[in-house]
Image: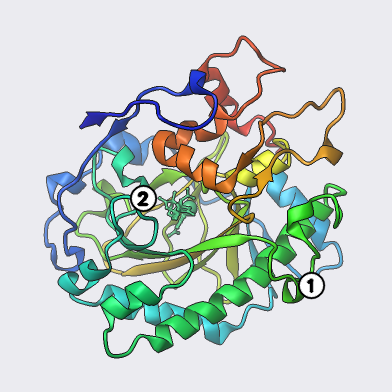
């Protein structure tokens, strides 16, 4: 373990050294018969909360006449919801799912040819947040930012064009859906086109700008001891919103104040949407990002595909002026997505609070600010 210095852009006074763990080489999880000590998580990180089967994450029909209000309510009270009638082509999701399966079933030495470099963002490897945890997660991932061509060529030297074509189409369709959802969510707060300059016109078809994104393919092989393993540790996404497709195997759980971990079951044809840290900033805390994680199971191989949507990476975002007045001062300082990702990669779960402007609570400690994370969640 090494202790990191506080070399992050932004307000240094909240930034403390953070433990960073380096882990052994990526194991081929599909062939492991017994859970290695390196992958055995402390029971406190797995069982500390009751898992509710009673409360269920809202399911919203995008063709409902009150869709904007329904989405706004779900963002305020849950930070996550499932959408149906979303218009995303089913066949494209199936194609992406089978390409993802094909990728993860390649021999390890082949996958490692497309490994994410130490200082890079794209490619094959463990979740980027792994270094913040003492134990290794029971998963592997592939991150795509920009063109996947370089990595695809290394994975499939003879035939990478299908992969690249499907990714391109997936990105185009997801961007349309993400922008549509974003505007419906903003609409519930009275925010209109023109109130956020970078977001451009609502119509994703005619808006080549309007945001940027990463695609994260996740693979969670069946695990010999699922109760002691962790698929993807608890985190919030650094996005405006994330759209997630999961195969027919459950594993995603969201954390709900006062309830604990709630499973988000895969529903045929539905997509999961969760609020990210940048939505919390833009909405000035009205729509908090949601803590979530992925657990694993004994018999089934689970796959998920996340579309992580945010603003153009160099554009400065801040709480939308329309939501501010004397009694609602801005709670967060302006930041670009690029800068935020840099902060998150250094101080992880402290990133959002490091941007807090403390006008409302100048005497609060870091811990109190952390506990405020769900301050605005209305149930
Ligand atoms: C744009 C990004 C968000 C992300 C970090 C990344 O640079 C690319 C991967 C994303 C992801 C996916 C899995 C969970 C997560 C916390 C992680 O470790 O990598 C997110 C990152 C994030 O939202 O901060
Ligand atoms: O696999 C899942 O259900 C969660 C994935 C996730 O949270 C992510 O990729 O950010
Ligand atoms: Fe996530």
Vertical order, 250 against 248 (above or below): above
User: Quick check: 109 left or right of 263?
Assistant: left
- The one nearer the camera, 153 or 162, is 153
Vertical order, 135 against 6 (above or below): below
- The one nearer the camera, 87 or 352, is 352
User: Quick check: 110 left or right of 268?
Assistant: left
Q: Of the residues tagged 1 and 2, which is closer to the observer?
A: 2
Q: Secondary structure at mark 2?
A: helix
User: Quick check: 147 left or right of 313?
Assistant: left
**Mark 2 lies on residue:** 128
Vertical order, 259 against 153 (above or below): above
Vertical order, 200 against 360 (above or below): below
Q: Find residue 300 and report its image quarter.
A: bottom left
Residue 159 in percent (x, y) is at 32, 90
Asked whether mark 2 lies closer than 8 Å to ligand 1, one says yes
Residue 92 in percent (x, y) is at 53, 83
Residue 255: tell me if it is visible: no
User: Quick check: 351 left or right of 184?
Assistant: left
- Disc number at residue 63? 1
Q: Secondary structure at mark 1?
A: loop
Residue 8 in percent (x, y) is at 45, 32
- The quarter in which the C terminus is drawn is top right
Residue 181: tell me if it is visible: yes
Residue 353 in percent (x, y) is at 56, 29
Q: Earlier in the sequence, mark 1 or mark 2?
A: 1
- The quarter in which the N terminus is drawn is top left
């Amino acid at each position: 373990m090494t202790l990191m210095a506080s070399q992050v852009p932004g307000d240094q006074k909240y930034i403390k050294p953070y433990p960073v763990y380096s882990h052994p080489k990526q194991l081929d999880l599909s062939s492991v018969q017994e859970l290695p000590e390196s992958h055995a998580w402390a029971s406190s990180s797995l069982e500390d909360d009751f898992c509710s089967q009673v409360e269920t994450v809202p399911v919203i029909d995008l063709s409902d006449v009150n869709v904007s209000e329904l989405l706004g309510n779900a963002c305020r009270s849950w930070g996550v919801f499932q959408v149906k009638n979303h218009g995303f082509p089913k066949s494209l999701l199936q194609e992406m799912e089978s390409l993802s399966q094909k990728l993860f079933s390649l021999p390890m030495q082949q996958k490692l040819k497309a490994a994410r470099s130490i200082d890079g963002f794209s490619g094959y490897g463990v979740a980027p947040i792994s270094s913040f945890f003492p134990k290794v997660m029971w998963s592997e991932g592939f991150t795509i930012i920009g063109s996947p061509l370089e990595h695809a060529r290394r994975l499939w030297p003879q035939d990478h064009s299908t992969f690249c074509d499907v990714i391109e189409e997936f990105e185009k369709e997801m961007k349309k859906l993400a922008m549509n959802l974003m505007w419906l969510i903003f609409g519930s707060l009275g925010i209109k086109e023109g109130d956020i300059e970078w977001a451009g016109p609502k119509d994703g078809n005619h808006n080549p700008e309007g945001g940027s994104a990463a695609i994260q393919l996740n693979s969670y092989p069946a695990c010999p001891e699922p109760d002691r393993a962790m698929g993807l540790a608890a985190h919030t996404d650094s996005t405006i919103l994330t759209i997630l497709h999961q195969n027919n195997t459950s594993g995603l759980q969201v954390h709900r104040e006062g309830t604990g971990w709630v499973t988000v079951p895969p529903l045929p044809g539905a997509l999961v949407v969760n609020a990210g840290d940048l939505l919390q900033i833009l909405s000035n805390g009205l729509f908090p990002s949601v803590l979530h994680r992925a657990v694993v199971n004994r018999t089934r191989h689970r796959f998920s595909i996340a579309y992580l949507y945010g603003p153009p990476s160099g554009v400065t975002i801040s709480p939308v002026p329309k939501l501010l007045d004397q009694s609602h001062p801005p709670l967060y300082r302006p930041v670009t997505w690029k800068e935020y990702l840099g902060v998150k990669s250094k101080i992880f779960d402290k990133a959002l609070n490091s941007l807090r402007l403390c006008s409302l609570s100048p005497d609060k400690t870091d811990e109190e600010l952390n506990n405020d994370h769900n301050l605005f969640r209305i149930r």
